[in-house]
Image: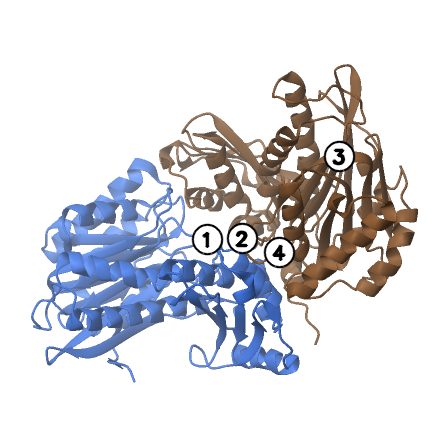
Chain colours: A brown, B blue
Amino acid sequence: MSDWQEIPGGVTAPKGYKAAGITAGLKPSGLPDLALIFSDVEAIAAGVFTTSHVRAACVDYCRQRLQSKHSARAILCNAGQANAATGSQGWIDAIESAMLVAQTLNIPSESVLLASTGVIGQRIRMEALIAGIPQLVNALSPTGGDAAAQAIITTDLVTKSIALETTIHDRPVRIGGISKGSGMIHPNMATMLAFVTCDAAVSTSLWQQMLSRAADRSFNQITVDGDTSTNDSLIALANGESRTPAITEMGAEAEKLEAMLTAVCQHLAKAIARDGEGATCLIEVEVTGASDEKAARQIAKTIVGSSLVKSAIFGRDPNWGRIAAAAGRAGIPFDQENLRIQLGDFLLMENGQPLPFDRPAASAYLKAKAAGEYLKDDTVSISVSIGNGSASAKAWGCDLSYDYVKINAEYTT
Amino acid sequence: MSDWQEIPGGVTAPKGYKAAGITAGLKPSGLPDLALIFSDVEAIAAGVFTTSHVRAACVDYCRQRLQSKHSARAILCNAGQANAATGSQGWIDAIESAMLVAQTLNIPSESVLLASTGVIGQRIRMEALIAGIPQLVNALSPTGGDAAAQAIITTDLVTKSIALETTIHDRPVRIGGISKGSGMIHPNMATMLAFVTCDAAVSTSLWQQMLSRAADRSFNQITVDGDTSTNDSLIALANGESRTPAITEMGAEAEKLEAMLTAVCQHLAKAIARDGEGATCLIEVEVTGASDEKAARQIAKTIVGSSLVKSAIFGRDPNWGRIAAAAGRAGIPFDQENLRIQLGDFLLMENGQPLPFDRPAASAYLKAKAAGEYLKDDTVSISVSIGNGSASAKAWGCDLSYDYVKINAEYTT
């Protein structure tokens, strides 16, 4: 039993938040493409961004903002153009977007954060954005979470949204979130975005630390095709509107809040890993017996990112050999004689050697997950133990099908 | 114009070497599966092996041999079973194989090196091996290079063999080599092997250094699906039979020898990258303007290993955005405003921003390479400059097609 329960509303579930999502005409498709998340009061803000050396203007903009000022009130997100590789003009477009939203909301422009997702090398369609902002601000609503979730996606098959509620100091505290990003990354569009809202009162440094740790246990542990984009961004706001006493240091309340924040991030991250044309299941790899969490994470991510493992899962092949090989090449030393591999309930390998097991049944397990209910019963579980200590970690991905290639090789002049 | 010329013979082209390849019955298919390379005299030996922590018995065996004794006379290679994840019995099988070959050849067992390729978790079919060794030794011939090349492959579509000849101290010196490994890695079989023979006289430490550097510029710079196997091995022998004065320190002769060794390794490595069902071309990425060679190598390998880049090439899509994104996430810092990307003769990006270019012509270039003569005119060239210095490096791979997935998802109980 969790310490929290799921509630509706997504990013607008926590107190004091509004959101909106409209069609401004940035996307050629005519689908919703401009989203806004707004806090009634200035909120503590933290972010985790792509570490790529080729970064979009919005990423650098946010990093600069958050370095000098650890709070914000609004997050503007446009879908359709990534505003990456757009040089100084792209930078100007970003600042202009922020200023315009700030003016319309009557808040300082320093309180606005930005995100973009779309085609690399294309500037934001500024005419459409400028024309759309008044409508966007007007559409802000305390039930606007779903509209926002819709307006940030590009090639995702489904929107990704969640909200959880717990009790801290006898008062309800909520965390909501939306994300986008999919297993099948369409030509020229490849970005993972996540926006999290919280109504607890937290100190600046603690909130950033919590978010970084949560990211390391969620978004940084998913892999779809191994590619990190130019625009990846995770932004989290905490506005204190729950009226709980401020959490300023680690302790029972802080741990509970961080655990719920991690759960929100993991839900959104897994949803990304699961999404995508062709992917038929979610793969969850848990590594145990590592000397530290970082080592466990590295091995887990290597396994779930292995093309050979992913395609074996697609082929419903309980291929322990490929899992073992992937574990071995993760860069973490271990004694192969301690290697233990389990797939679902099937023990495939122990003490570094294969065990006899019911192959048809194991294959049937894989087939069942491919037919299982979306994000409820479609997780293939792989457990790997390496015998170095007691640290553990998880990573998530999806299977590799030929539809992945088909989509990514699609090209028309 | 090179300092050397290509000659026939593969591993038996250099003086004083014999080779053989026979069908011993290790492979279920009945194809050739046991190979032997033999030097008339004890040869200096060097090796580069998988760094995976899950390693086959033959790899550990070779590493131990080469640590205590830097010379060898024979390399025995079996195809069909990897002898990996086979525990202590696998170790015994390895030692037994070496002893048997040594006895039949009338040489010390310490002079025998081993390699295996095949199904992980399966022991070598020792009955067949034991029965086949006398026939194998009997088949040794100074023109046996091709037979050996044939007997080491598993799922390769073509054998891979080369020999080069140059002049050092006015005498002919030759280096030959064979390799196996393919872009399409069949379920449970995934290994890169390469065996190199040379008739120069070289000191032990220099030969190992040359081989390590050559490996870093060839085999360690190819990526097919990102997976390193449990069995990857590169073994090189230098037996002095060319009667050139021994090369014991760096200088003009040593540089020439190393350059030719590197050329042999690069030919064999590129052949691996190119091979495989579904791969329609070779992709060569050259990175220039790096601060050091290691950084250039890392970026080049990241680009050529990117699933998004590979599938774009398969789709004949001149997708500079994906190349830029891959370069940015390689872990090497650079100023994105210095990024320059060229595809064949097409300049796609300069100073971090895209340039207008003839898209249909660039796509036609990609189509032409896919139809080009095998390893003669089927190389897609990608050049990336990052503006940090003057170091450069190359990496090779192949495009990603749905046949890759189809083959790797193939599974029958």
Which residue in the protein does label 3 denote? A43
Are the two marked residues, 4 and 1, in contact with CB atoms closer than 8 angstroms?
no
- Sequence-wise first label, 2 or 3: 3
Q: Chain of mark 1?
A: B
Q: Chain of mark 4?
A: A
Disc 2 from disc 3: Cα separation = 42 Å
Which residue in the protein does label 1 denote? B227
Residue A82 in view? no
Q: Nearer the viewer, residue A259 or A237?
A: A237
Q: Position of residue A11 (x, y in %)?
A: 80, 38
- Sequence-wise first label, 4 or 2: 4
Look at 8% across and 67% down and name the residue there. B246
Rendered image: mark on residue B57: none
Which residue in the protein does label 4 denote? A230
Q: Position of residue B177 (x, y in %)?
A: 27, 68
Which residue in the protein does label 2 denote? A307
| Position of B334 relative to B245 (above/below) | above
Q: Chain of mark 3?
A: A
Disc 4 from disc 2: Cα separation = 22 Å
